Image: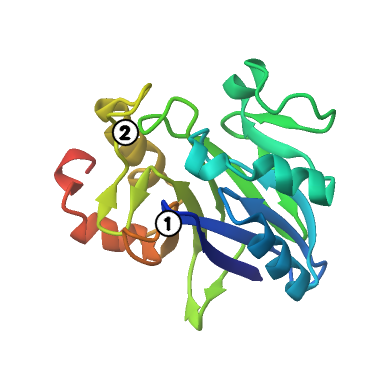
Amino acid sequence: MILKRLVVGSYIVNTYIFGSTNTKEVVIIDPGAEAEKIINTIDSLEAKPIAVLVTHGHGDHTGNVGVISSYFDIPIMFHKSRYNWGRYSSGKDNRGLTEGDTINVGEYTLHVLETPGHSPDSLCFYSKDPKEFDGQEIDGIIFTGDLIFCRGIGRSDFGGGNSNQLFLSIKNKIMNNPEFTDNFLIFSGHSYSGDVTSVGEERRENPYRQYFL
């Protein structure tokens, strides 16, 4: 598995490069800034980007989406509502995503969850296929954007945010999701909230857990 995190921009956004060591196919998740850094990393991995994925439309996560898409001539995949508004929809291969959609990356399948609360167009991407990360056995991975962090949650005071929706998304789509075990790793959208965590850790230690368990 290829899974590389790059911390980009003044808002300390996590950009992820995820894909297959076998086929070298990768997706780029939330290229918010520092396009040259992202491109150089992909080149060093000798990877073959197939799409840009967007967890939500805030500028700190989307700032270099167009640059990366154009450079590699690959589609952008983002929430269907934003696609319908016309954002990024000019490219013929761009794709609006809804709950239950899947994205194939080599031998891995990413599943799409709609998780409003931080913003109306928030998405999470998860896969049950990875079984090992950094020397530990796991049951899968989730890219959560700004929904939930290591010992934290996303803000809901931006335009379109809603705290009740946020907690319901965490509760119904993450904590009570029968697809997930405590041994699913969470890869969040910002580094200032800590490093990789897991569903089990956040169930036990997140200070907001009373609102989503």
Question: What residue appears at the point 68 percent right and 37 percent down from the top-left corner?
Answer: 77
> Which label number is shown at residue 203?
none
Question: What residue appears at the point 31 percent right and 61 percent down from the top-left corner?
Answer: 200
172 vs 199: above or below: above
The x, y position of residue 47, in whole percent, is 78, 67
Q: Residues within 10 Å of mark 1 (few under 14, many from 20)?
A: some
Q: Earlier in the sequence, mark 2 or mark 1?
A: 1
Q: Is residue 92 left or right of residue 1?
A: right
Q: Give the secondary structure at mark 1.
A: loop
Which circle, 2 or 1, is nearer the viewer?
1
Q: Residues within 10 Å of mark 2 (few under 14, many from 20)?
A: many
Q: Name the residue tied to disc 1.
A: 12
Q: Name the residue tied to disc 2.
A: 166
Q: Give the secondary structure at mark 2.
A: helix
- Residue at the top extreme? 85
In depth, the one of 24 and 64 nearer the eye is 64
Q: Is residue 197 left or right of residue 134?
A: left
86 vs 194: above or below: above
- Report the amino acid beneath label 1: Ile
Question: What residue appears at the point 36 percent right and 64 percent down from the top-left corner?
Answer: 197
Is there a contact, CB below 8 Å, between mark 2 and mark 1? no
Name the image quarter holding the C terminus: top left
The x, y position of residue 153, in whole percent, is 28, 46
In depth, the one of 115 and 61 nearer the eye is 61
- Report the amino acid beneath label 2: Leu
In depth, the one of 46 and 102 nearer the eye is 46
The x, y position of residue 124, in whole percent, is 50, 43
Distance between the alpha carbons at the discs numbered 2 and 1: 21 Å
36 vs 145: above or below: below
